[in-house]
Image: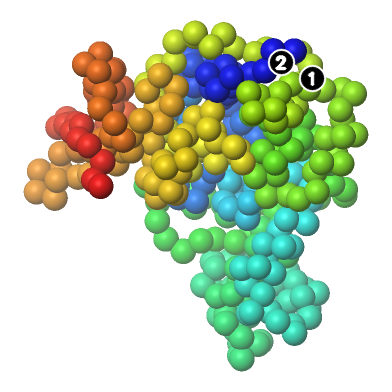
Amino acid sequence: MTPLDRRTLNRTTLSRQLLLDRASTPPYEVVRRLVGLQAQDPEPPYVGLWSRIADFTTDGLTDLLHDRAVVRGTMFRGTQHLVTADDYRWLRPTLQPLLTRWQRGAFGRSTAGLDLGELTAAARELLAGGTVSRPELARALGERWPDRDPVGLARSVQGLLPILHPPPDGVWGRRGPTPFVLAEQWLGGPLADRADTERLVLRYLAAFGPASVRDVQAWSGMTRLRSVLEGLRPRLAVRRDRDGRELFDLPDAPVADPDTPAPVRFLALLDNVLVGYDDRSRLVADHQRVHLMVHPPVTVDGFVRGLWRIERDKETGAALLDVRLFEPLSPAEEDAVTGEGLRLLRFAAPDTAEHDLHLRPLDP
């Protein structure tokens, strides 16, 4: 079988991720197709959907959050994600080994020597009455264990218990204390009673494949997935890239034509298409990776070429899209970036008619 080159992997990934042509698919179906959206802050999931869905508006996601069709919680890699409620029910139990490690690694000092079962039971009791903010939970747990870091105790609960953060948390433009609620209460029923790691891997491959074992692990935060993929091998297509790495995929999943045009896209901060691989070279150069942890990127011809941010003039309220480039663009590429950038401003800053865009080299 012919090895898959970088450009073929790029176009295949963009096609799976709905980044070649905006879809007319409802937001719920896109969240499901992508197996969730990175949601450390409220705005990135909205930008992620805007970049993929034709005529997307913020209400399209906000309504799903209020209807409890989409939920926000600590998921892949121990980070906040939006997933469909149906997916959360089986994903959360499947990701529990990762979340146990995450709690131990991030907040192990706060809980060293503490009976985690006792902490879990105390938190569940405090949350039994409904939604409690993280500061309120921290104060209550701190009163019970006054010699411990109360914030560390409260944040540990996100790994120990299925916790959701209901709206207005996660809604466009909203900032404030993070609310905690027990997932089974918010969803009106229990979660799955067992992990389903094969389902996790197959859903990932549908949205991100072809991909290696290390890619699946980097996306999910899970370890020891090689045995899962080996068990699935008879049901999968197995390919290789130009470096000889073994790439797994669904057998009926198409591989894109490397010459397919790829339009300019302003991607969300930490969009999973960027961080969902161990080997990110299909979209990102190695020297660019460090920048993408704090700034969202713009892609040109399918590859990251710059970073962007929206600023507001304090006096006039005008919205400025500041685009910093890793390398110069051709005149045609500049026109394409400008056109897509102004569309982004109309989406992200609809309250002002004054929009401007600056293209400049990335500061050394």
Q: State the residue at coordinates (23%, 45%).
A: 363
Q: In this view, does 178 lie above or below 56?
A: below
What residue would you read off at disc 2? 253
Q: In this view, does 29 lie above or below 216?
A: above
Q: Which amino acid does label 2 sit on?
A: Ala
Q: Do the residues labelled 2 and 1 touch (CB within 8 Å)?
A: yes
Give how far across and how far down residue 343 sits, in percent.
29, 24
Give how far across and how far down residue 263 sits, in percent.
40, 16
Helix, strand or loop under label 1? strand
Q: Is residue 57 visible?
A: no
What residue would you read off at disc 1? 237
Q: In which quarter of the image is residue 8?
A: top right
Extreme-front residue of the structure: 243
Q: State the residue at coordinates (52%, 19%).
A: 7
Give how far across and how far down residue 301 sits, in percent.
40, 19
Q: State the residue at coordinates (65%, 35%).
A: 35
Q: Distance between the residues labelled 2 and 1?
A: 9 Å
Please report whichever mark, 2 or 1, sits nearer to the chain's N-terminal start.
Answer: 1
